[in-house]
């Protein structure tokens, strides 16, 4: 087990290296630079700026310097906010994104599992059709449509919740719902399918024949196998929730990593773009690994593979 | 007359054989009401998009600054925005762009994915594991981020949008085609083709790819909504189609900014995009059930 984890962790290194290299040269080869403003910067100021950000040296030298910084865990100073380092800026925005992602995941898993499992216990009844139709709506309505529509109804029409922001508990409801809804829909469909398959197995019939209560049959015997497809989906779902935060954080003005990334790209803040991309990539790799481990734990047949 | 009778019989056999797979699939598709609904809605939307320049009430960038934003009325059925642009016209032109991006980028991903997957599956061995390892690594990359970087740093033009989205979406297609080709390769008719001395590319294009067509079509139908969603997402962030041009993502963004005063600017584009995505998903699910009855529903 530990061997597998170590091997997977070692695989992160080349992937992250490829990402660093690709993004580093991609953004520097593109036309335009971080010091291009409407007003021309005086040459001596420009020279100082370039020295501060290590841009006076040849490109390959910048690249190796950046890699050396990375090895020390230093992502460099931000171009836009010169007084902050990229490490500090990520440190400020990430907790907000993590909180938002966590709530969204709770929404997705709770709503999704409840709807999916309850639908699977009475297939082809009203209890199946209603949540499954809602799930189809959840899949087809993208977050940047759902978010504004929720604001329109709950904030502007009924005046129940704030339009935007991320400071009071009430302001966190709509962003979390918006981000989690689509994944709740997928989880509902997956858990319904998985449960239906497991419930048709012989061992479930045996459990029922033993006279176990229906709750016990479902919770103790069917659930573990039935939610396996949901677990494999959690990897892509985490990646999706992370990149979904671009839109949701922009709509609701949440000061998180996603909005920071989009803004840094618009500002051509080279170091901040690099830093956030790397951070996102590492997060996605990490969550994929975590999901694989949960999978192995749930399905012992995978342990020797 | 004996010759005519023979040819009739032969024809009968040919027709029956040719119809069995696709005819069967069509029959199953026709029974699926949701898929039919999707097909009909989609055809209607595509038809409107095709003839938009002839039937749109106003040009997409025509402004009527005298009145500003108007709620839906007899002259402007879906109202106008702050610059007095007719929403119905912008919605129709936007649909053209959104659908075009959807189909063109899917075509790019189809081309790359099918060729790549077929080559990997057909040649097998080390080349195959090397090519699939690349796909695995690319799966791990945060692609939305790359597309955003590409669009910000290399200008927001539509051709680049096609290429960037197509480049993201080909991976799954490559995997599916590779799996199909690998299992087909073991079949006798491919062995026969090899024994006849046909060159590899002929075997691939004449024998392997046509037989993998079912899953390819199904996955392509399911790729189109993903692509349209990505385009809308980029336009929503201000990175895709630029004003005064129009696309559904862009209209939703504009609508979101002004929804307090002019809610119709948000509602109608949202309906248009969601309805199209619904139809594509229903049709894709229906096609999957029709062409590949073994595949599970979820």
Image (cartoon, coloured by chain):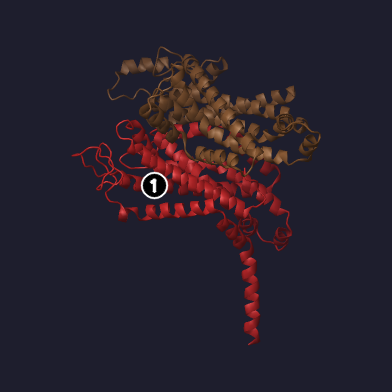
Q: Is residue A160 above or below residue A77?
A: below
Task: Identify the image quadrant of the C terminus of chain B.
Answer: top right
Q: At numbered mark 1, what does the secondary structure look like: helix, strand or loop?
A: helix
User: Does residue B263 appear to the left or right of A256 in the view shown?
Assistant: left
Q: Which of the 4 image quadrants contains residue B189? A: bottom right
Q: Is residue A260 above or below residue B142?
A: above
| Image coordinates for residue B165, horizontal then vertical, percent | 48, 41
| Image coordinates for residue A2, horizontal then vertical, percent | 73, 22
* Residue under the image location 49 percent in, 52 percent down: B37
Instruction: Check disc 1: other Cα within 10 Å, few if <14, some if 14-19, many if 20+.
Output: many
Q: Which chain is red?
A: B
User: Does residue B57 appear to the left or right of A299 in the view shown?
Assistant: left
Task: Identify the image quadrant of the N terminus of chain B.
Answer: bottom right
Closer to us: B85 or B205: B85
User: Label 1: which residue?
Assistant: B95
| Image coordinates for residue A272, horizontal then vertical, percent | 45, 21
* Residue under the image location 43 percent in, 41 percent down: B160
């Amino acid at each position: 087990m530990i061997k597998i984890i170590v091997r997977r962790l070692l695989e992160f290194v080349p992937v992250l290296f490829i990402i660093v290299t690709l993004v580093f040269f991609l953004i520097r080869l593109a036309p335009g630079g971080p010091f291009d403003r409407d007003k021309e910067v005086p040459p001596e100021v420009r020279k100082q700026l370039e020295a501060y950000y290590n841009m006076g040296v040849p490109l390959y030298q910048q690249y190796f310097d950046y890699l050396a910084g990375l090895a020390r865990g230093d992502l460099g100073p931000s171009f836009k906010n010169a007084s902050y380092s990229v490490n500090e800026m990520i440190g400020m925005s990430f907790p907000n994104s993590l909180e938002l992602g966590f709530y969204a995941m709770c929404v997705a898993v709770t709503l999704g599992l409840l709807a999916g499992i309850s639908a699977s216990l009475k297939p082809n009844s009203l209890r199946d059709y209603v949540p499954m139709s809602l799930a189809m709506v959840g899949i087809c309505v993208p977050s940047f449509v759902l978010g504004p529509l929720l604001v329109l109804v709950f904030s502007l029409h009924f005046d129940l919740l704030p339009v935007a922001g991320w400071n009071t508990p009430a302001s966190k409801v709509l962003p979390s719902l918006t981000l989690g809804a689509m994944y709740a829909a997928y989880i509902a469909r997956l858990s319904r399918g998985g449960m239906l398959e497991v419930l048709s197995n012989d061992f479930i019939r045996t459990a029922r024949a033993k006279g176990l209560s229906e709750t016990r049959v479902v919770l103790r015997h069917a659930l573990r196998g039935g939610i396996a497809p949901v677990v494999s989906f959690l990897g892509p779902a985490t990646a999706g929730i992370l990149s979904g935060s671009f839109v949701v954080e922009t709509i609701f003005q949440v000061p998180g990593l996603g909005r920071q990334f989009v803004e840094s790209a618009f500002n051509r803040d080279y170091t901040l773009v690099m830093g956030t991309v790397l951070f996102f990539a590492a997060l996605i790799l990490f969550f994929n690994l975590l999901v694989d481990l949960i999978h192995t734990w749930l399905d012992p047949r995978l342990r020797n593979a | 007359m004996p010759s005519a009778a023979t040819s009739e019989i032969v024809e009968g056999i040919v027709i029956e054989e040719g119809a069995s797979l696709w005819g069967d699939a069509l029959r199953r598709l026709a029974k699926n009401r949701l898929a039919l609904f999707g097909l009909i809605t989609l055809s209607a939307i595509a038809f409107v998009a095709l003839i938009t320049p002839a039937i749109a009430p106003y040009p997409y960038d025509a402004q009527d600054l005298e009145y500003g934003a108007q709620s839906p009325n007899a002259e402007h059925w879906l109202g106008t925005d702050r610059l007095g642009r007719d929403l119905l016209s912008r919605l129709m032109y936007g649909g053209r762009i959104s659908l075009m991006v959807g189909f063109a980028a899917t075509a790019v991903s189809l081309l790359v994915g099918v060729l790549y997957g077929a080559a990997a599956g057909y040649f097998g061995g080390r080349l195959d594991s090397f090519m699939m390892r690349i796909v695995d690594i690319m799966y791990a990359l945060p692609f939305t981020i790359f597309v955003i970087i590409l669009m910000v740093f290399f200008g927001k033009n539509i051709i680049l949008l096609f290429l960037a989205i197509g480049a993201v979406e080909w991976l799954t297609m490559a995997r599916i085609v590779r799996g199909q080709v690998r299992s087909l390769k073991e079949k006798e008719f491919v062995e026969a083709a090899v024994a006849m001395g046909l060159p590899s590319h002929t075997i691939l294009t004449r024998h392997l790819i046509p037989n993998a067509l079912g899953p390819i079509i199904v996955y392509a139908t399911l790729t189109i909504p993903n692509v349209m969603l990505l385009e809308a997402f980029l336009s929503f962030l201000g990175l895709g189609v630029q004003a005064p041009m129009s696309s559904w993502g862009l209209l939703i963004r504009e609508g979101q900014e002004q929804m307090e005063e002019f809610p119709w600017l948000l509602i109608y584009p949202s309906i248009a995009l969601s309805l199209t995505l619904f139809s594509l998903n229903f049709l894709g699910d229906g096609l999957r059930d029709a062409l590949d009855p073994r595949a599970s529903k979820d």
